[in-house]
Image (cartoon, rainbow, N blue to C red):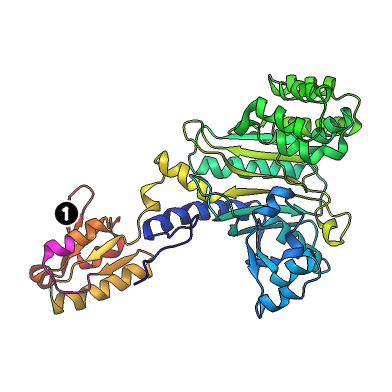
Amino acid sequence: MIKPGIPKGTRDFGPVVVRKRNYIFQTIRETFEVFGFQPLETPAMENLSTLTGKYGEEGDKLMFKVLNNGDIYTNAQHAKDNRELVAAITEKALRYDLTIPFARYVVMNQNELALPFKRYQMQPVWRADKPQKGRYREFYQCDADVVGSNSLLNEVELLLIYDTVLTKLNMQGYELRINNRKILFGLAEVIGKTDLLTDITISIDKLDKIGADGVKKELQERGLTDTDITTIEKFLAIDGSSEEKLAQLKDLLHSSETALKGIEELSFVINSGYTSFNTAPIIDVTLARGLNYYTGMIVEVKAPASVKMGSIGGGGRYDDLTGLFGLKGISGVGISFGVDRIYDVLEELKLFPETAQQSTKVLFLNLGEASARTAFGYMMQLRQRGIAAELFHENAKMDKQMKYADKRSIPYVIILGESELQENTMSIKNLTNRQQDKIGAAELLNYAF
């Protein structure tokens, strides 16, 4: 007998969990729609050539590749080199994120799209990470992106989407941390190591995981001199208010026009004055987001400090992304929600409302043929009103039926016994406060469930 199981890093979701997750999805989806974004879906698999080289060296290693159909062994035997060997074995991979597939979609459908194109996408992605708390191999992302516009108002609006959703979810204490990749490129310019930009950003992005000494060691291993590292350490030590950080950045990176442009963009986002945030964005110069395609503002959302959880969202500007597929000059900016981590945060902080956990609201007890037949008609009336209702599946002892309602967290049961049928009434019991009302049957549709 085979013992049933599922792959590491994946999960089953029971009814209660699915309802809580749907509460998160609905909150995000409604916000995307209110901000004018349109829905999009792309395939679970993409061509390997579409994904490779877009996420940095580490990202390429974490892709789940899909084996080709047919006689793989025979094809592999005839391979002349490693490139042909890989092609013989796999030509497809599960999508690593939603942004690259979106860029591919834009290029393939460029003649049909009205620019700027604002899309949102809510689908699973797959990464071969080591499973741990808050890190799964299969997980959902919820993305919102704008392509075809250079306006920094898009950055402001995307930050507002984060702010709006997390406020609706009642998640107090989250942080919106922002930086600009132009500033990081300017740092590489100042030390004369633009060819090592990716190495620098990947190391900086690990600061909160490996500490300053770990970053220094990595930078040394990647070929940076002590003088280079001293400048980077000064950069990482920048602190204070937003205005103080901007001033320190200007002072340290004044010789780089690219950095000054990034500082100007960051200043606009922080000081736009178009609206006020419930939680103001924080400039974080250590934020690097080691993905190659970011070119402007980058953002990362941190969970409340009381929860041991990493990022619950992130994104940024990627002016050159569609250029990877031959479509030049199309600017883009986007954000992503990590729904699985958001779920874990809400669960730990007990922030899910009761309404997010309920399914059936009313259970009609089955007290015999006449009771069930009458109850069925009333049940359908409630369903037509949009109230989730059930009739217990069999004529069983009342205690069994009440235990079923309690286990399902159904808040109301309706009793149609002999006396209720004769009087054309019904008894409604609230299982939350244990109060019971007796009403006329005609009053059912006006009852405040």
The amino acid pointed to by label 1 is Gln
The reply to whether residue 247 is in sight is yes
Q: Secondary structure at mark 1?
A: strand
- Is 437 situated above or below 278? below
Question: Closer to the camera, 97 or 376?
Answer: 97
Residue 394, x across and y down, in percent: 18, 74
Residue shown at 65% from the left, 78% from the top: 69
Residue 411, x across and y down, in percent: 26, 55
Magenta span of residues: 392-402
Left or right? Give the position of 249 relative to 430: right
The reply to whether residue 351 is in sight is no
400 drawn magenta = yes
* Residue 78 falls in image quadrant: bottom right
Residue 295, x across and y down, in percent: 80, 43
Residue shown at 66% from the left, 64% from the top: 93
Q: Residue furthest left?
A: 419
- Is 106 situated above or below 244? below
Question: Closer to the camera, 267 or 384?
Answer: 267
Residue shown at 87% from the left, 34% from the top: 193
* Residue 50 falls in image quadrant: bottom right
Locate the N terminus by quadrant.
bottom left
Residue shown at 30% from the left, 64% from the top: 445
Left or right? Give the position of 183 relative to 3: right
Left or right? Give the position of 420 relative to 259: left
Identify the residue under disc 1.
Answer: 436
Locate the C terminus by quadrant.
bottom left
393 drawn magenta = yes
* Residue 80 falls in image quadrant: bottom right
